[in-house]
Image (tube, rainbow, N blue to C red):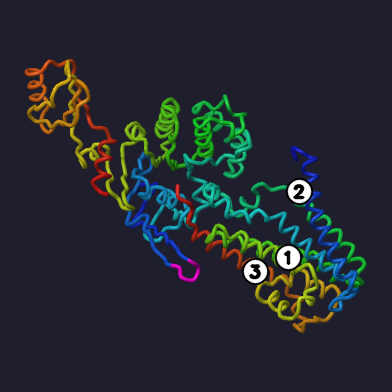
Amino acid sequence: MPATPAIHAQDLGRDFTLTTGPLLRRTRRTITAVHGLDFTVAPGEIVAYLGPNGAGKSTTMKMLTGILTPTRGHLHVLGMRPARRRTALAARIGVVFGQRTTLWWDLPLRDSLALTRHLYRVPAATHTARLDELTHALDLAGFLHTPVRQLSLGQRMRGDLAAALLHDPDLLVLDEPTIGLDIVSKTAIREFLLNLNARRNTTILLTTHDLSDVERLCRRVILIDHGTLAYDGDLDGLHALAPAPRTLIVDLQAPADPLDLPGTRHLRSQGPRQWLELTGAPAPAIAAAAAHHPIADLTLHEPGIEDVLARLYRGRS
Amino acid sequence: MAQYPLSLALLGLAQSLSVIVELIAVLVVFGHAHTLAGFTAREALLVYGLAGTAFGLADLLIGQVERLGDHIRTGTFDTMLIRPASPLVQLAADEFSPRRLGKVIPALACLTWALATAGIDWTLQRALTVPLLLASGAAICCATWILGACLQFFITEARQAANSITYGGKALTEYPLAVFGTDTARWATFALPLAFVSWQPALYLLDRPDPTGLPDQLRHTAPAAALLLCALAALAWRTGLRHYRSTGS
């Protein structure tokens, strides 16, 4: 028997009704935030849930956690309908909103985590063991006794992750977990998540605008745009969806007129440096450049996922 | 338990003062008129004591729900929803403060004194009914508060409108209902059953006919009215949660 999917969404949709105008002559307008979403996430997957601002990412996250009731379609998370069984589901999932904390502002981190234990009814012995493990893995020891309001953003985020994981959830939902963090904190959190997934087989669904999160963490990407599913597959497939051309960066020894090389198109120049978009194979272009111009340096730039997404978003709006 | 006991004591005292001022108001009104709608000052204090205790208990238990709109606006209500505990309980427990006992204690003292001196013909049944009447009254106040809070699911700035029901209704329960006239009495019995917080219980304890002309059997239905209103509040809460829209983020 196949395992129950961590998330199963079928024709999922959510509308919002906006009322504007004075009390008696109100006009109602229905806005569809999410429409006809179909996707399934298997236990143990790490999935990036991407989309431009306003695409419906947060709305989906809130439906998954039971905060919002779907207007249409079917949604099962860990085999439960979130809006109906929100409390039962909450005991089995961990949620981190990067933009706000679930910790108690005035309490030391240790007390905040202890309160969380009572809310989730974790036995004391289990709690102590988990807290030790998370303190070690997330390096919390230095600020366990500091009030949450005095923590730095990176420390607070690690504290929030610990709070979301103390009850050993099967599914971890992260809404922009690395927002505003420096590179060291980001790396620490990514390493931790990979480790968690490998050791406990925790399913992780995360939204982010930081695409290095995606390249480092996720084998699978779900892309949502204007409330509908735009792509569901691996990273390579996403590259193929909107092929972004490679760029040849040529550093000449002196500033020159735009180069005209076979299989390239000139993009821009800055002093002796020129950017050329490759439309064909790079070898003839490089050979031609070397034959006719004094060259200081040559770089071939592979398109990143940023370029792919930028092209996708632009193409659709 | 309290980090700053003096601060807690002063805040509690401030709450007590508000109750004492209301008590003085009742005494001033009845001191001038001696009887109003057939009620003496001592009987009026019984009504006030029942109302004040019920309201104070409700305020202690669940008064924080009126801040629902703030929690929705700032997004903290979302964080309550992702925890495996009732958001209503979390809302009520948020910034719970024993200073609210400051409202209950003087009201309870007033009630005790009135029960002893208002000339009640004590029977075993009457004595046993007092806690039930208080519980019903407190339940009605709690339900009213929750109903008010539910408005904020639809209009987050509705706290003032909700206050007009909760605090406005409170003023109605503090005096013998007959003072306000028959129409108000009917509204407060059948529309929003605040009459069962203090008025009908007082009629029962004093064993007096209802001067507003409503059937005398009504005084036995306070627990039923409380249950009905609580069921309505629960329904409204569930409906509100289902229509909850969260805030953009």
Q: Gap between marks 1 and 3, in whole Å?
A: 16 Å
Q: Quick check: is B175 in the magenta stretch?
A: no
Badge 3 element: helix
Q: Which mark is residue A58?
A: none
> Taking A90 as reference, is A8 left or right?
left
Q: Residues within 10 Å of mark 1 (few under 14, many from 20)?
A: some
Q: What subunit carries mark 3?
A: B
Q: Quick check: is A23 in the magenta stretch?
A: yes
Badge 2 element: helix
Q: Residues within 10 Å of mark 3 (few under 14, many from 20)?
A: many
**Dot 2 and dot 1 within a common chain:** yes
Q: Earlier in the sequence, mark 3 or mark 2?
A: 2
Badge 1 element: helix
Please tell me whether residue B128 is drawn above or below residue A216 in the rendered image: below
Which is more toward the observer, A75 or A29?
A29
The residue that appears at 71% across and 59% down in the rendered structure is B58
Count of numbered labels shown in the rendering: 3
Q: Main secondary structure of the magenta part?
A: loop
> Taking B53 as reference, is A40 left or right?
left
Which is more toward the observer, B41 or B83?
B41
Q: What subunit carries mark 1?
A: B
The residue that appears at 70% across and 55% down in the rendered structure is B61
Q: Which mark is residue B170?
A: 1
The percent position of residue A260, horizontal first and vertical second, equals: 9, 28
Query: What residue would you read off at disc 3?
Result: B229
| Magenta stretch bounds | A22-26
Nearer mark to the viewer, of 3 and 2: 2
Q: What subunit carries mark 2?
A: B
The percent position of residue B9, horizontal first and vertical second, equals: 80, 44
- The type of residue carrying mark 2 is Arg
**Dot 3 and dot 2 within a common chain:** yes
> Pointer 1 and pointer 3: residues touching (CB < 8 Å)?
no
